[in-house]
Image (cartoon, helix red, strand yellow):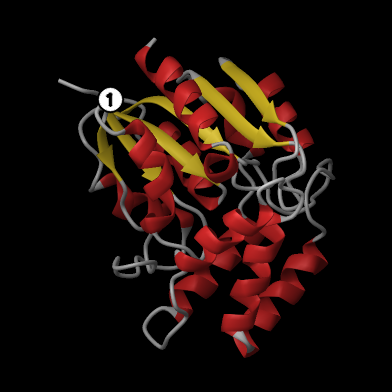
Amino acid sequence: MSPDLVLLHGWGLSAAVWKPLTEALAGTFTLHTPDLPGHGSAPPAGPSLEAWADALLAQLPDEAILVGWSLGAQLALHLARQAPERVTKLVLISSSPSFVQADGWTTALPASTLDTFRQDFDSAPDATQRRFVALQSLGDSARKAVAATLGDSLTTADDTRKAALADGLRLLAETDQRYIIPTIRQPVRLLHGSEDKLMPVAAAEWLADTLPDARLTVFGQCGHAPFLSRRQECATLIEGFALD
């Protein structure tokens, strides 16, 4: 029986963003691609990281390898600590324990930058989402293709989704999981782009140094979505790690 691989996407998108990677992984794993709460076709789950994690936990197989990207990586870390018996390994893509700067943590966005982004989303959600897509593809040698795939995978900020999407931005602004990192016992594979403009590679280096069992691969000339621009390389690394 093939291992269960669960892929958790990032803010503002849907599980459709995983299609290029899942095509590369097909046949090796039993793949699960749930939408995050309030994203894609999933109902909202409440305003807290715990509520989002509980909603996802209900969809996890008994033993899963979690692949989390960006906000999905934050949720994967939370789930690994909350339900260690359900999570066997972690693959964290473009991850950080804290998306914004804090005391003793400068390898992140200034809090004021994300505050402005949240205000812009409130008044002009569609334009703000497009700007977020552009930031994720910056610095990538395949920038146009990455931006196109991200744009095609956006969750529309309509009346039924806007509040949940705003909750997701607040989670990015407020979540700081530095304190749980030394307690994560699952093996972890970190994948990161050298030119990531949202989550600096230094955050992944900190994770690699602080997690008890972790290894980091950095892709050159790559932005925030290496699983799109380095699809086959990511698939090969995930397979090697998950099946080891």
Q: Residue at x 78, y 34 (%)?
A: 202
Judge by depth and name the residue closer to the eye, 228 or 82. Answer: 228
Q: Identify the image quadrant of residue 14.
A: bottom left
Which amino acid is tagged 1? Thr
Count of labels shown?
Answer: 1
Q: Residue at x 35, y 70 (%)?
A: 44
Q: Name the quadrant of the C terminus.
A: top left
Residue 118 spot, x, y in % from top left: 66, 75
Q: Is residue 213 left or right of residue 83?
A: right
Judge by depth and name the residue closer to the eye, 81 or 158. Answer: 158
Q: Identify the image quadrant of residue 22.
A: top left
Crowd class of label 1 (few under 14; some 14 to 19; many from 20; radius 10 Å):
some
Judge by depth and name the residue closer to the eye, 34 or 87. Answer: 34
Q: Is residue 135 left or right of residue 164?
A: right
Residue 1 spot, x, y in % from top left: 14, 20
Residue to which mark 1 is pinned: 28
**Residue 6 to residue 40: above or below:** above
